[in-house]
Image (tube, grey):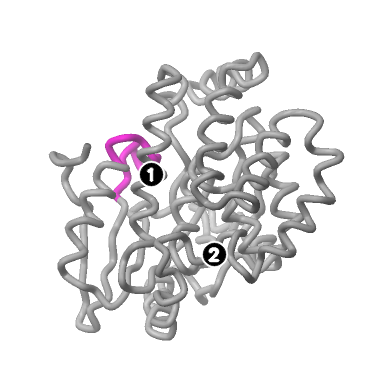
Amino acid sequence: MSSLAAALPIDIDADRLATITIEPNHGPMVILDRALIQRLEATIIALRPQNPAGLVLASGSPRLFIAGADLKSIDAMTTTELEHYLAYGQRVFGLLCTLACPTAAAINGAALGGGLELAMHCDGLIAAPPAPGRDGTIKPYPVGLPEAGLSICPGWGGTNLLPARMEPREAMERTCEGRTLTFDQAVVAGLFDEVAPGQAELLGTAKAWLKRRADVVGRRRDGLPLRWLGRDGPRNAAHAALVELLPTRMAADPGRACLLAVRAGLEHGWGAALVVERTELNRLRHEPAGKAAISAFLSKSKV
């Protein structure tokens, strides 16, 4: 699908640590649209023969990591088109988990929805404190999965990834409600594997983390994300959290859809969870609540 896509910029340093820079594609913003996913696929494929010792996934935007998916395009797709699109994104994100080197996402700003899902396919999340605004004030940036706030659900693995990177019940509740975290809350929650002293040190901190974590490749030889709720470490806590939440969250969407994906992952594996996410997202965006929320969001974005 991406045979004609241009690769994103790749820099490989003297230690054979590669940095892929995700270039802004909507003004100063990075939004996950089909063209960007195609470029990401082409980039990872081009990187493999170079056998890097580690990979940093960085943003070329000065203010954010990735703002999320291209909701306008998603809203315009038919059911079949969206099914194929979500499956394609899931496959491309999954390529990061097949690399024979440790990977880290360098989070410099807002990482929302599909942007956080892409980052969580990396072995490590390395973040920097928010940069001062033009007026000198510092405003914590958001990190999380806001889809439920639009009456839909994550579609690229988020339901099964976030509970493996922070306290599972809180992660599931936030996903079911579409409540994101601020940078400060994410630090307290333990979402990040390491926090750089500042924006200028982010790339160096990510590379230093990679050098210390060469061992992680052996822990994901199955080609799945290093941190997802089906792994031995988070599985029991995730299952306990699911049991606690089922009586209240299964009564209504979008919480029900999110927990169905969690249950599928725990009971049937990563692939099953991805199928549920695709199916439920496609269903929810056709429901009256989903249609109204997406329409309101797109109308607001035009202003």
Please check the rendered image and state whether residue 28 is part of the magenta-colored stretch, yes or no: yes
Count of marks, rendered view: 2
Residue at image point 54% right, 75% down: 194
Residue positioned 81% across, 50% down in the render:
243
Does residue 8 appear to the left or right of 169 in the view shown? left
The three-letter code of the residue at mark 1 reads Val
Q: Quadrant of residue 38?
A: top left
Graded by Cα atoms within 10 Å as few (under 14), some (14 to 19) or many (20 or more), the crowding at tag 2 reads: many
Residue 300 in the image, given as x and y percentages of width and height: 55, 23
Q: Which mark is residue 227?
A: 2
> Which of the labelled discs sits on residue 15, or is there none?
none
Residue 299, percent across and down?
A: 53, 18
Q: Position of residue 176 (x, y in %)?
A: 71, 41
Does residue 37 lie above or below 63 as drawn?
A: above
Residue 32 is one of the magenta-drawn residues: yes
Give the residue displayed 43% in from the left and 82% down from the top. Answer: 215
Report the residue marked by disc 1.
30
The crowd level at tag 1 (other Cα within 10 Å; few <14, some 14-19, many 20+) is many
Check if mark 2's residue and mark 1's residue have beta carbons within 8 Å: no
Question: Which image quadrant: the N terminus?
Answer: top left
260 or 196, which lies in front? 260
Disc 2 from disc 1: Cα separation? 24 Å
* Residue at the image position 52 percent from the left and 76 percent from the top: 197
Judge by depth and name the residue closer to the eye, 143 or 230: 230
Where, by quadrant of the figure, is residue 139 drawn? bottom right
Above or below residue 256? Residue 63 is below
- Give, as a single range, the part of the protein colored magenta: 23-36
